[in-house]
């Protein structure tokens, strides 16, 4: 036998030994597994089906979750009088509706109820409708999440979540209370709230509401408390458009055809780069010490931009006719033109002897011939003709007793 053939036979013998030793390691698993269905495996482990055997209900719920973990629906659930659909009685629970619906019945309670304070409850991916109380009643949950839910035609609030929660990509419509309501420090993003009897979206202290739409709600379209941010939202045909409490910001928003003010902001707030049009009262209304910057107010029944404060700044805005006319000097509130200690740079001017056009019903002074003490401002030319038009000239602002010229603007 040649040396080469001898080496080939030796290699084959070694391979045979290796295969014989390793064969037990490659055997298949148990061919006779224990009885019962195999549960689905979620992203982080096995999930539990919502069922009579695994999550049995009690006197006021059809199903009840009592342990932390991941749960899912395998079909629709139909409600009963006097009961919630699913009660969550544990923290750190994820409930996946799996595309199915919780459908209420006359006299039923909430679709999903969390009656006792819990932490870290997430509910997602399904529909909750026709329940006698709230769609999701989770106001007691801290640091929770509601995601990709549709809540409609419920007897109370559509979707409710507590402090520090996140509500995203949800729709709430035709509920008898608010559409979406959240607690302190919560975030609501990319949601739609329509035709609700209460507010469209309701936030409290330090809430962030972004990329949302509020349409045809009987109350405010969007309301949020102190220190909140409302950004890139639209409020259309609501009882009122967007309203925030003190020290808040409203930016890049649109408010149109609301039955009251388009945008309203409390003391020390900022309203920037917003559009308010065709509202039945003021387009933008702010309280003391506010900044209104780069906004457009168009065809509002009340004032385009209104403040009755002695402090703040209104600058670089565009107030578009038609205006609602003039009112008597000294009229309290709307239309009053007076010299106060705020900065005001606008394209609208006061008519001496008359109130300000309602396109800007601000009490800040702008080019009026005399201040309230009867002293003429130095270097200020009186308006020509009937006061409704004048030749182009630099804009001026009256700020703490100094008259300043601002180039690049003309009277309108």
Image: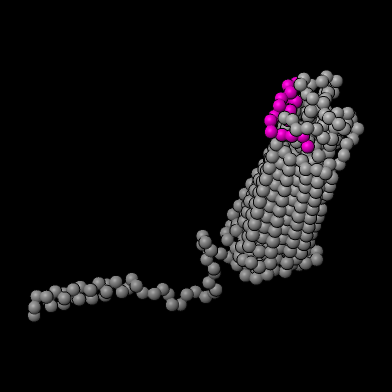
Instruction: Tell me where residue 111 appears, x and y as whole percent.
Output: 72, 61
Instruction: Tell me where residue 213 appears, x and y as whole percent.
Output: 71, 53
Q: Residue at x 68, y 30 (%)?
A: 407
Q: Compare residues 36 and 44 and report the one nearer the observer.
A: 44
The answer to whether one can see residue 309 in this image is no
Instruction: Tell me where residue 165 appears, x and y as whole percent.
Output: 64, 49
Q: Which residues are magenta?
A: 395-412
Q: Compare residues 341 and 91 and report the one nearer the observer.
A: 341
Q: Residue at x 79, y 55 (%)?
A: 216
Tell me the quarter of the image containing the C terminus: top right
Q: Residue at x 87, y 32 (%)?
A: 386
Residue lying farthest right?
328
Choose top left, top right, bottom left or bottom right for residue 159: bottom right
The answer to whether one can see residue 72 in this image is yes
Vertical order, 161 against 40 (above or below)? above
Q: Residue at x 74, y 34 (%)?
A: 410
Within the magenta stretch, is there residue 53?
no
Q: 45 left or right of 293? A: left
Residue lying farthest bottom?
1
Q: Compare residues 81 and 244 and report the one nearer the observer.
A: 244
Q: Compare residues 29 and 194 and report the one nearer the observer.
A: 194
Vertical order, 394 against 166 (above or below)? above
- Label total for image: 0
Tell me the quarter of the image containing the N terminus: bottom left
Colour convention of the picture: one colour
Q: 125 left or right of 130? A: left
Instruction: Tell me where residue 208 appears, x and y as whole percent.
Output: 66, 45
């Amino acid at each position: 036998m040649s040396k080469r053939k001898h080496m080939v036979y030796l290699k084959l013998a070694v391979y045979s030994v290796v295969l014989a030793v390793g064969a037990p390691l490659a055997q298949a698993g148990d061919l006779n597994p224990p009885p019962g269905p195999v549960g689905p495996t979620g992203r982080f482990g096995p999930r539990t089906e919502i069922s009579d055997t695994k999550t049995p209900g009690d006197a006021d719920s059809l199903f009840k979750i009592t342990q932390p973990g991941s749960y899912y629906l395998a079909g629709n659930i139909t409600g009963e009088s006097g009961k919630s659909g699913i009660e969550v009685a544990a923290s750190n629970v994820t409930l996946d509706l799996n595309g199915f619906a919780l459908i209420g019945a006359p006299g039923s309670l909430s679709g999903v109820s969390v009656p006792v304070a819990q932490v870290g409850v997430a509910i997602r991916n399904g529909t909750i409708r026709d329940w006698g109380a709230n769609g999701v009643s989770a106001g007691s949950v801290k640091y929770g999440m509601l995601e990709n839910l549709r809540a409609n035609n419920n007897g109370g609030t559509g979707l409710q979540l507590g402090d520090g929660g996140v509500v995203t990509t949800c729709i709430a419509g035709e509920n008898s209370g608010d559409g979406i309501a959240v607690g302190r420090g919560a975030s609501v993003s990319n949601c739609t709230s329509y035709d609700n009897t209460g507010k469209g979206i309701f936030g409290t202290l330090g809430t962030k509401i972004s990329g949302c739409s509020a349409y045809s709600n009987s109350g405010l379209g969007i309301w949020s408390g102190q220190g909140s941010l409302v950004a890139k939202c639209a409020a259309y045909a609501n009882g009122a458009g967007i309203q925030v409490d003190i020290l808040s910001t409203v930016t890049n928003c649109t408010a149109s055809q609301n039955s009251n003010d388009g945008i309203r902001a409390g003391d020390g707030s900022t309203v920037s780069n917003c559009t308010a049009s065709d509202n039945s009262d003021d387009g933008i209304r702010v309280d003391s010490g506010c900044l209104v910057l780069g906004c457009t107010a168009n065809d509002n029944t009340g004032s385009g931009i209104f403040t009755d404060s002695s402090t703040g700044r209104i600058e670089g805005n565009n107030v578009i006719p038609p205006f609602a006319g003039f009112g008597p000097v000294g009229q309290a509130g709307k239309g009053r033109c007076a010299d106060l200690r705020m900065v005001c740079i606008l394209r609208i001017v006061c008519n001496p002897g008359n109130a300000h056009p309602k396109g800007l019903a601000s009490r800040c002074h702008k080019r009026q011939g005399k201040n309230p003490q009867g002293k003429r401002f130095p270097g200020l030319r009186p308006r020509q003709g009937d006061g409704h038009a004048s030749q182009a000239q630099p804009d001026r602002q009256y700020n703490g007793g100094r008259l300043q010229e601002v180039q690049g603007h003309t009277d309108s």
